[in-house]
Image: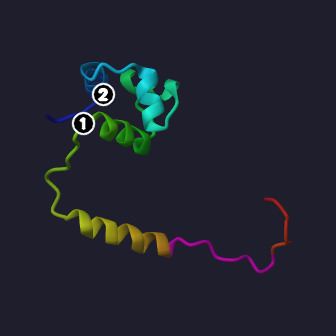
Amino acid sequence: MQISAAEEFGGIIKKARKSLGLTQSDVAGASGVGLRFIVDLERGKPTCELGKALRVAMMLGVKIEAQGSHIESEEIADEQSDQESDEKPKKNKGAIKGARK
C-alpha cells in the first residue's frame, strides 16, 4: 500500500491499534510517547515527529518499506555517519567558559 498523506498513515496506526485491542494510552505507554502524540498521529497531524511515529508503527507491527530507491540501506547508514562526523561542532577558542549564547 502506498501512503501519500499523514491522514492515511494515522488511519493505518489506528486500525492496527484497534485490531490488537489496545487503547491509545496502552500504545503511548508501550512506545514511550505521550497520549497526545498518539491522538495527533491517528488524526493525521502532518508535523508528528517521524522517529516517534516509526517507533509506534514498529510496536504495533506495522511494517514500513521503502521502494524505488537505487541505494541500499547500508549505504544510506554509511552516508549518514559520514555527514554526522562532518557536522561535529568546532570549538570556539574565543568563547568564555560557562557563557551562554
The mark found on residue 62 in the picture is 1
Q: Position of residue 81 (x, y in %)?
A: 41, 71
Q: Is residue 33 left or right of residue 57?
A: right
Dot 2 and dot 1 residues touching (CB under 8 Å):
yes
Q: Which part of the image, by quadrant, shows the C terminus?
A: bottom right
Please name the residue that numbered disc 2 is placed on.
13
Residue plotted at (32% across, 26% down): 10
Q: Nearer the viewer, residue 30 or 6?
A: 30
Q: Secondary structure at mark 2?
A: helix
Q: Secondary structure at mark 1?
A: loop
Q: Quadrant of residue 82?
A: bottom left
Q: Is 91 within the magenta?
A: yes
User: Crowdedness of circle 2 by 10 Å Cα count: few (<14), some, many (20+)?
Assistant: many
Q: Position of residue 60 (x, y in %)?
A: 30, 33
Q: Main secondary structure of the magenta part?
A: loop
Magenta extent: 86-94
User: Crowdedness of circle 1 by 10 Å Cα count: few (<14), some, many (20+)?
Assistant: some
Q: Is 45 within the magenta?
A: no
Regarding residue 96, the answer to whether it shows in the image is yes
Q: Is residue 36 above or below residue 75?
A: above
Identify residue type, mark 2. Answer: Ile
Counting residues from the start of the chain, the first of labels 2 and 1 encountered is 2
Q: Position of residue 75 (x, y in %)?
A: 26, 70
